[in-house]
Amino acid sequence: PSPKILIKGGTVVNAHHHEVADVYIEDGIIIAVQPNINVSDDVRVIDATGKYVMPGGIDPHTHLEMEFMGTEAIDDFFSGQAAALSGGTTMHIDFVLPVNGSLSAGFEAYSRKAEKSCMDYGFHMAITKWDDDVARDMDIMVKERGINSFKFFMAYKGSFMINDELLLEGFKKCKSLGALAQVHAENGDGVAEGQRRMIELGIMGPEGHALSRPPLLEGEATARAIRLAAFVNTPLYVVHVMSIDALEEIAQARKSGQRVIGEPVVSGLVLDESKLWDPDFITAAKYVMSPPIRKSGHDKALQGALSSGILQLVGTDHCTFNSAQKAMGIHDFRKIPNGVNGIEERMHLVWDLMVETGQISASDFVRITSTACAQIFNIYPRKGAILTGSDADIIILNPNSSFQINAESHHSRTDTNVYEGKRGKGKIEVTISRGRIVWENGELKVEPGTGRYVPMPPFSYLFDGIDKMDSAYYSSLHAPVQRMIKTVES
Ligand code: URP
Ligand code: ZN
Ligand code: ZN
Ligand code: ZN
């Protein structure tokens, strides 16, 4: 049983409103949000005076214990989530990979992996090939398993990549189910060509990773996915937007009214590619992810797009490999397992980078780290808000305290950290996960098996009016035909 808790005197921040108020929690649910709540002696009182009380972060993009590139991501559903909680993230959405091409088998496998969870989680499903079984299984995933988003890979040629014909099939299927289509947008054929060029030039080190898959390949795939989604008239979610090239395509589409969601990840907002040229292999290899971390300048543009609303929410793509795993690519950058950490650092880094610098408000921070994710994936206001009746996933951030990041003290299982040495303003001092205080005084109190699966229903607000747009389109096609019939009659 979770304790009764009163958070007193803090500034309660939601995406659209903030006020000084108390928050009362019972049985993992927020019971009341108002000033001056009086409670009995058996209630644990936390003084939050001068601090921000905000919804726990929701990370829309993680890969815990994923089998990938000949190895397995080292943070599992317990260690990755414990790390998340210590950094103020109380829910994540992980990508289920099919097993032997079967979505159902993949869902079973991931459900087993997630049995040791210590925080709430949801699932996206990766689509890595296309056939009738996959299409049929998508129905089951949406109608019976609580999945409302599917990621299609336009890169990773030879393993996950699917072509435009299948992308169109996938988009159509998503639309018919009211599920959101997501894309990993890089031109996979272009990447393969870029890699051949590097090999010919004898560039085998981690810098070859960035050089082989430049921003224009990301821009091209983003543009193509956007236009195919427009052709099908279905909403599109672009994961890990890393470049100005991709950003400009998203901005243009949104300006024309198309429903495109763009998700930058922390590494793209904070880092630049220079580290890939470090002469020490491991130091460089830890920064290898796809799409690659870009040249300085892309980071600033992504931050600006986030503050202006062109991009809507921040993920991490947390997918960690230790030094020994990264060393698989010591003679060939193509074999370096792709992925960086971030699930633990996201909230602190985004606060410091965006709020402390005055680029966004505290309410904006809540929106891009929590509320927008809950709304897009249709679990709002159960998640993503401090409102009566919402799950008690809450953080307390002290704006006058500071954080510092290093591999020595982080909670992830990796032996390196791409944010090594970074420090900043704003410290998450308390994390409450569905009414349980799991992070306090620098101490984690987590138990495997306490996290719950959060099913995500289809047909979010993103689908509102899509059917009307379709009938308008089809009747516009019929109009000339009817004119012709009239002409013949007269
Ligand atoms: O490098 C990355 N991003 N690893 C995880 C897999 C993916 O494409 O998101
Ligand atoms: Zn205000
Ligand atoms: Zn991806
Ligand atoms: Zn990813």
Image (spheres, helix red, strand yellow):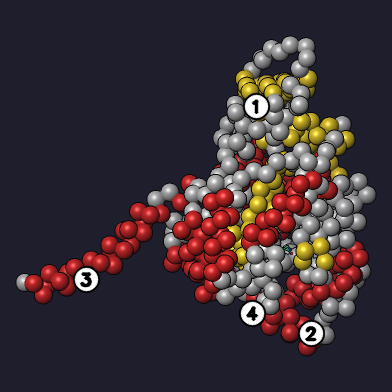
Q: Distance between the residues labelled 3 and 2?
A: 56 Å
Q: Distance between the residues labelled 1 and 2?
A: 57 Å
Dots 4, 3 in contact, CB < 8 A:
no
> Which circle's residue, 3 or 1, is located before the other in the chain?
1
Q: How crowded is mark 4: few (under 14 residues within 10 Å), some or many (20 or more)?
A: some
Counting from the top left corner in percent of width and height, residue 456 is at 58, 46
Q: Distance between the residues labelled 1 and 4?
A: 50 Å
- Provide the secondary structure element on which disc 2 rests: helix
Q: How far apart are marks 4 and 2 (CA)?
A: 16 Å
**Relative to residue 143, is residue 170 depicted above or below?**
below
Q: Does the residue labelled 3 lie within 8 Å of ligand 3?
A: no
Q: Residues within 10 Å of mark 1 (few under 14, many from 20)?
A: many
Counting from the top left corner in percent of width and height, residue 282 is at 90, 66
Give the residue displayed 69% in from the left and 29% down from the top: 28
Report the amino acid beneath label 2: Ile
Dividing the picture into quarters, in which one does residue 483 lie? bottom left
Counting from the top left corner in percent of width and height, residue 48 is at 75, 24
Kindly identify which numbered label has been placed on residue 481: 3
Q: Is residue 315 left or right of residue 79?
A: left
- In the picture, the quarter occupied by the N terminus is top right
Q: Read off the residue under disc 4.
A: 189
Residue most extreme to the bottom: 200
- Which mark's residue is nearer the viewer, 1 or 4? 1
Kindly identify which numbered label has been placed on residue 199: 2
Counting from the top left corner in percent of width and height, residue 86 is at 81, 41
Kindly identify which numbered label has been placed on residue 30: 1
Give the residue displayed 41% in from the left and 54% down from the top: 466
